[in-house]
C-alpha cells in the first residue's frame, strides 16, 4: 500500500473514564467479550486497559433521526448525545448476559424497520449502549428505500 492509498485515520479509540475501573473492565472485556489488547500502569492507582472492538465506525445522526431511533429502540426514552453500539451475533443472548453482568436493560431486543435486532442498556462507566444483530446484509439493505449515501441523495 502506498502512502497515497493509506487512509488518514487508522483507528478510532473511544476513551472512557470509569470511576469503578474494575467493574467496567470486567463488563466490557469479560461479559461483552472484547479482547484485551494491552494494559498500562504508570504507578500508584493509574491504570488503563485497551480493548479490541472489531471494526469501528462513527454514526452521525441529526436530532430528528436520534428521536426516531430512541422511539424504535427504547420506547422513546432519550439516549445520551453519545451512545456506543455493539454489533453482536446474538442480540437477545448478549442482552441477557450483559444484564446478568450488571447492566440495566432499558429496552429488550426489538426488530427495526431496517432489519436489525436492537436492545438498549445502561452499562458501567455511565454509558448507555445499544446491542444490535444484523438480520440482513448491507447489500440487501442498500436496496431498501431511504438507504444509500449522502452523495446519492444530492
Image: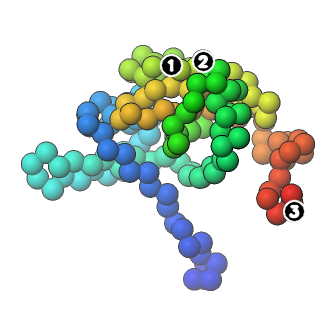
Residue in front for this viewpoint, 77 or 125: 77
Image coordinates for residue 73, horizontal then vertical, percent: 65, 26
Image coordinates for residue 123, horizontal then vertical, percent: 42, 29
Query: What's the mark number on residue 108?
Result: 2
Q: What residue appears at the point 62 percent right and 83 percent down from the top-left corner?
A: 4
Residue in front for this viewpoint, 124 or 10: 124
Tell whether label 2 touches label 3 (CB within 8 Å): no
Residue for badge 3: 154
Residue 52 showing in the rendered view: yes
Q: Is residue 93 above or below residue 140?
A: above
| 130 to the left or right of 45 | right
Query: What's the mark number on residue 17?
Result: none
Residue for badge 1: 105
Chain-order first, disc 3 or disc 2: 2
Residue in front for this viewpoint, 120 or 68: 68
Tell whether label 2 touches label 1 (CB within 8 Å): yes
Q: What residue appears at the point 66 percent right and 47 percent down from the top-left corner?
A: 61
**Element type where label 3 sits in the image:** loop
Amino acid at each position: 500500500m502506498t502512502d497515497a492509498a493509506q487512509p488518514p485515520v487508522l483507528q478510532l479509540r473511544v476513551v472512557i473514564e470509569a470511576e469503578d475501573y474494575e467493574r467496567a473492565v470486567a463488563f466490557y472485556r469479560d461479559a461483552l467479550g472484547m479482547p484485551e489488547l494491552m494494559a498500562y500502569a504508570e504507578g500508584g492507582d493509574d491504570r488503563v486497559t485497551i480493548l479490541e472492538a472489531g471494526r469501528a465506525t462513527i454514526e452521525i445522526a441529526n436530532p430528528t433521526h436520534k428521536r426516531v431511533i430512541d422511539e424504535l429502540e427504547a420506547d422513546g426514552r432519550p439516549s445520551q448525545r453519545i451512545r456506543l453500539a455493539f454489533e453482536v451475533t446474538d442480540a437477545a443472548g448478549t442482552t441477557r448476559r450483559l444484564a446478568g453482568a450488571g447492566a440495566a436493560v432499558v429496552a429488550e431486543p426489538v426488530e427495526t424497520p431496517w432489519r436489525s435486532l436492537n436492545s438498549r442498556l445502561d452499562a458501567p462507566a455511565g454509558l448507555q449502549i445499544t446491542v444490535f444483530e444484523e438480520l440482513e446484509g448491507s447489500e440487501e439493505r442498500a436496496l431498501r428505500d431511504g438507504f444509500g449515501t449522502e452523495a446519492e441523495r444530492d
